[in-house]
Image: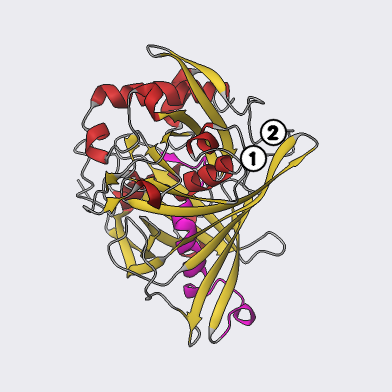
Amino acid sequence: MAHTAQVKIPATYIRGGTSKGVFFRLQDLPASCQQPGEARDKLFMRVIGSPDPYAAHIDGMGGATSSTSKCVILSKSSVPDHDVNYLYGQVSIDKAFVDWSGNCGNLSTAAGAFAIHAGLVDAARIPENGVAVVRIWQANIQKTIIAHVPVTNGQVQETGDFELDGVTFPAAEIVLEFMDPSDDGDEGGSMFPTGNLVDDLEVPGLGTVKATMITAGIPTVFVNAKDIGYSGTELREQINTDPDALKRFEAIRVAGALRMGLIKTPEEAATRQHTPKIAFVAPPTPYTASSGKTIAAADVDLLVRALSMGKLHHAMMGTCAVAIGTAAAIPGTLVNEAAGGGEREAVRFGHPSGTLRVGAQAKQVNGQWTVTKAIMSRSARILMEGWVRVPGDAF
């Protein structure tokens, strides 16, 4: 039988925060993939190397973890007062689908840097030396993200001495502002979809668990570590090598998704792996991070461990960090209580790779909590640029 040739598609491989992904300009994609649909999904799965029953991504650009199984499309923004539209696809590792239901907070950093690098930002907005303010329209969730990207001699400054736990080498700091991060859309949606700061969540096979369910950054279900038999100091291997534990977390996630109204039947959760996230919190306790570094109780306000795409994340998803910062700013949530209670504008939390600081500005309006923005620092670096090649019959 005849086989089609490989197709070359301009692409850039970028680390953003503690994630990495394959970035495309919309105009560089094959015509059939320039709009949402099956062709685009098939292309991205083939680029990443999914679905892969070996869970290794040997025949693709992915790294067989949720943090490295990502594709991004950027284009000049169609939204007033924004520079670029940023669309993110979380590619499933073992199933044939791409999840478009949420954002990647880590790659939001890279979106700001890539927008400048790819010529998608008006030259008048880029200083010769200084900080470029890139106004990103996050197209998955219809939100604004502002990236403050350092520029030297008209180019993105990528090297620097900003250290991010979970990233091996230092780089230049990029400050991200997630504007109005809660999901209080036109349909009278609330940051707390159940109307409560804490709920009793009925989880099949587990019983009743206290949960804070919030939609800020990304829909997230928070539970107390001790309520599910953990200390909050766990590293990836302890959870990810325990199939029963992963099943329990998925049961909590599905129960939360149903209560939050994100899905109508438990079966739907299988095609919505990216959201909601599930995380567990604990008060400060000393532990050894995955790098071997000791994290003292005094170094953090609380401990958080979160799962992404069914596995414990090696550090922290950026969007989940927004949820953590937001929930921590609101007295009475499980996250706020783990951090010691009271009103706070920022928290430093411990995750498997170290610590991360995230700020959030919360206020009460007519008895409803609102958050105007969440802020955190990340970094981004282009790892490789050129073309990805994909068999022409793959999409």
Q: Which residue is drawn at 51% across and 36% down?
A: 335
Amino acid type of the residue that numbered disc 2 sits on in the rendered structure: Gly
**Residue 192 is one of the magenta-drawn residues:** no
In the picture as drawn, the residue positioned furthest to the front comes out as 298
At mark 1, the secondary structure is: loop
Q: Specify whether residue 393 is in view.
A: no
Q: Where is residue 207 in the image (x, y as percent from the top left)?
A: 43, 12
Q: Which element is circle 2 on?
A: loop
22 and 141: which is toward the camera: 141
| Segment tinted magenta in the rendering | 98-127
On the question of residue 8 being in view, the answer is yes
Q: Residue under circle 1?
A: 183
Which residue is rendered at x = 49% and y = 31% of the image?
221
In the picture, measured across the screen, residue 130 lies left or right of residue 62, that is right
Q: Residue 146 carries which label?
A: none
Towards the viewer: 379 or 210:
210
Badge 1 density bin: few <14, some 14–19, many ≥20, Cα 10 Å:
many
Query: Closer to the camera, 230 or 395?
Result: 230
Query: In this figure, which residue is indicated by the disc labeled 2?
Result: 189
Residue at point 68%, 34% (across, down): 190
- Report if the CB atoms under discs 2 and 1 are less than 8 Å apart: yes
In the rendered view, tell whether residue 37 sits above or below residue 123.
above
Three-letter amino acid code at the position of disc 1: Asp
